[in-house]
Image (tube, rainbow, N blue to C red):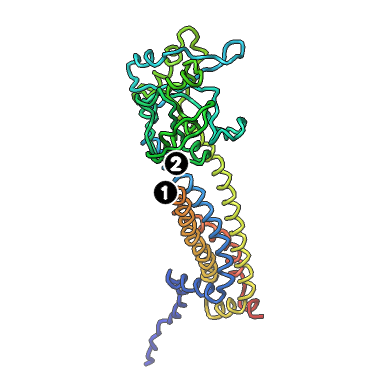
Amino acid sequence: MSTLTPVRPATTPDPLPSPRRLGLSDVLRLGMHGLRTRPVRAFLSALGVAIGIAAVVAVVGIPASSKQALNDQLEALGTNLLRAGPGQTLFGADAELPQNVTDRVRRIGPVDGVAEVGATDATVRRTNLIDEQETSGISVVTARPDLLDVLEGTVHDGTFLNTANSEYPVVVLGSVAASRLGISEIDPKSPPQVWLGGRWFTVAGILDPVTLAPEIDRSALVGWGAAAKHLGFDEHPTTVYVRAEEHAVGDVQRVLGATLNPQRPNEVEVSRPSDALAAKELTDSAYSSLFLGLGGVALLVGGVGVANTMVISVLERRREIGLRRALGATRRQIRGQFLAESVLLSLLGGVSGVLLGVLVTAGYALSQQWPVVIPIAAALGGVAAAALIGAVAGAYPAVRASRLTPTEALA
């Protein structure tokens, strides 16, 4: 009786081990290895990115600091100041404001304060030995005691015009006028004198800079009565400053011309000094856009430098790539290694550039006595832009490295 031999089931071969995936820490370690082995080349490549990012951060941060300083200044001085002056007649001649206009302006309900100044033909010099033509760009104007309150100005030294000295040959100098005349302080016992309108005037005070009325900084101010008595002033104002309630500035601006000169309101020019500062800020932002473009060009150059470095790195490390491929590294792992190295290189430049841009912005802002403002979006955007540049610049070298076969790389 024959016995049946049991048939053994066929054995299935053991499955091949799946290629091991590199963790994030492994990829970063491989990327840092490439940077550590070539520190000088890595530094120079990162420097290009750093300069571009620093330029972008500074170009965004400095105007932001300037704008914040302007806003703080306008908030302190107020944007409710209006300036009115004579324009031109229908025939192109210079117009003239009527006398005694301040009382009419005060009747406008929302008006909080009004002051007037008048230009004279007089000149001011340090001594009577200086030629009359050497005026140093200083205007002689008349003013009333309430001018400083309306402009919210301050006295640097001495006193301003008041009811006690406005009828006498006394003068108050704006900040620029005092500097050009070489007068920096007032000694009450022996105050300085200047030659003004053919006679000596005693300097009673020096003003701090008046931001919203820079023409006052370049002026020598004398009392209304003293100008009429000693300088032949005809008492027609040439500039009227008006403070109005904030919510009604536009309404006051629309009726101010007709109030100052009811017969010919078209011959009155009304402006808002704070608008001029805002226009200057817009001009500054135009220049900022130009420098922002230059920063973008610097970033492009930095990206090209990173790409060049990575291409050369692939050519120099063919044996390393071949050895890793022979030991089982996949194309993806090789590609990830070089891409990580490129991104890390650019991030190094990006972080350094952000820090450099912050230092430049802070240094310049502090030198101008501005608040330091660093937009968070600019800082984070700089780092993100650096990472993007690294990814784009390293894409081609990483793909090229991954396509090398072990035999090609080790040949």
Label 2 residue SS: helix
Q: Earlier in the sequence, mark 1 or mark 2?
A: 2
**Residue 144 seen from this side:** yes
* Residue bearing the label numbered 1: 373
Residue 377 drawn at (x, y percent): 43, 49
Q: Residues within 10 Å of mark 2 (few under 14, many from 20)?
A: many
Identify the residue shown where x is 48% and y is 40%. 183
Farthest residue toward the top?
Answer: 263
Closer to us: 316 or 197:
197
The x and y percentages for residue 253 are: 42, 19
**Where is residue 129 drawn, in percent x and y?**
59, 35
Residue at horizontal 59 percent and vertical 59 percent from the top:
302
Q: Which residue is mark 2?
A: 67
Within 10 Å of disc 1 (Cα), the crowding (few <14, some 14-19, many 20+) is many
Q: Are marks 1 and 2 in contact (CB under 8 Å)?
A: yes
Q: Residue 45 location in percent, x, y?
A: 58, 65
The amino acid at mark 1 is Val
| Badge 2 amino acid | Lys
